[in-house]
Amino acid sequence: MSPFHVPSEAIILERIQESPNIFTLRLQFADNTQAFKFMPGQFNMLYLYGVGEVAISIVSDPLDDHFFAHTIRVVGRTTEGLSKLKAGDCVGIRGPFGRGWPMLEAEGKDLLLVTGGLGCAPLVSVIEYIMRRREQFAHVDILQGVKHADDMIWRKRYAQWAQAPDVNVLLTADLPDHVNWPGDLKGNVVQLFKRLDLRPDNSLAMLCGPELMMKAAITELQQHNMSDDNIWLSLERNMHCGIGQCGHCQMGEKFVCKDGPVFAYPEISANFHLDSI
Ligand SMILES: Cc1cc2nc3c(=O)[nH]c(=O)nc-3n(C[C@H](O)[C@H](O)[C@H](O)COP(=O)(O)OP(=O)(O)OC[C@H]3O[C@@H](n4cnc5c(N)ncnc54)[C@H](O)[C@@H]3O)c2cc1C
Ligand code: FES
């Protein structure tokens, strides 16, 4: 059977608590002889033995090809079980699956990375990728919005990224609290667009997070004359097989697991109605 059907064993090297209900696992395959090749935006299926399997984005940089990382929010049975694991414990891994972000098309362009909540996970590996290859891309805007200030994980990383040349980082919270909030920005992430100096002719946008947020962002980008071909988004659907066989993640004629999770907007616009904001 192919490794895409049978999980390979991976060992937890480190477990990091990012917020009360979000944690990161740094992992390495038990048989660590081969490099683990993936593209930013791809995901793995994590199997918690005896409990269940869940789709989780890979958040590390593909250059670190002998270990990889996942950041997980506890929402149900499997993610809760995964949260109880510690360094030295094992999980099963199938993957990497799906199509990642268009890194070749992005070269030489201004990049607008817009994320909401833990939606930032599929874009973190892109940001790491860009930072290590900064000269290959033009101006970079990173916009991250959360509901509560406490949900803003990776603040140190955002602060580091903001130091890189020609990188603009804007963080916002719907409900900032005065004690625990570094910036003066509050409200919805899409409201930050008015602070940007977008060059639609040479820009590519990457969006991930709640679908309502992505729909609002697409509408705003269209109003800024951004071509739909340059708007990319990462979708989440209920997944079982991860390889286009069970139909759980089907969206029209597309399978989110196999044809996505990253899509150019025109590829899915027929099933992603902007008027349902
Ligand atoms: C391509 C892809 C990438 C993903 N990447 C990540 C990632 O990097 N990190 C991460 O934490 N999750 C990610 N997810 C979501 C993750 O797969 C689900 O949260 C997980 O399957 C939930 O499994 P569970 O058994 O813990 O919860 P379940 O028992 O299946 O669900 C419990 C309850 O939570 C609800 N629920 C399920 N998923 C979510 C969700 N995403 N948000 C809020 N409520 C939910 C269910 O409707 C149900 O009511 C990704 C999903 C996809 C498809
Ligand atoms: S998860 Fe089975 S077809 Fe996509």
Image (cartoon, helix red, strand yellow):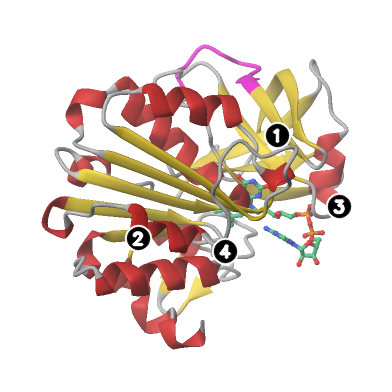
Separation of disc 3 and disc 1 at Cα?
16 Å
Which residue lies under the disc numbered 2?
Answer: 194
- Mark 3 neighbour density, 10 Å: few (under 14) some (14–19) many (20 or more): few
Magenta: main secondary structure:
loop
Residue 229 in which image quadrant: bottom left
Q: Secondary structure at mark 4?
A: loop
On whether residue 32 falls in the magenta region, the answer is yes
Q: Secondary structure at mark 2?
A: helix
Please tell me whether mark 4 or mark 2 is closer to you in this view: 2
Which x, y percent locates residue 88?
A: 80, 15
Q: Nearer the viewer, residue 77 or 140?
A: 140
Which residue lies under the disc numbered 1?
Answer: 92
Query: Farthest residue toward the bottom?
Result: 275
Which residue lies under the disc numbered 4?
Answer: 210
Residue 19 in which image quadrant: top right
Which residue lies under the disc numbered 3?
Answer: 77
Mark 3 beta carbon near ligand 1 (under 8 Å): yes
Query: Given contact means CB atoms under 8 Å apart, are the residues at marks 3 and 4 in contact?
Result: no
Q: Amino acid at mark 3?
A: Arg
Separation of disc 1 and disc 4 at Cα?
28 Å
Q: Amino acid at mark 2?
A: Lys
Which circle's residue, 3 or 4, is located before the other in the chain?
3
Residue numbers of the magenta segment: 27-35
Q: Amino acid at mark 4?
A: Pro
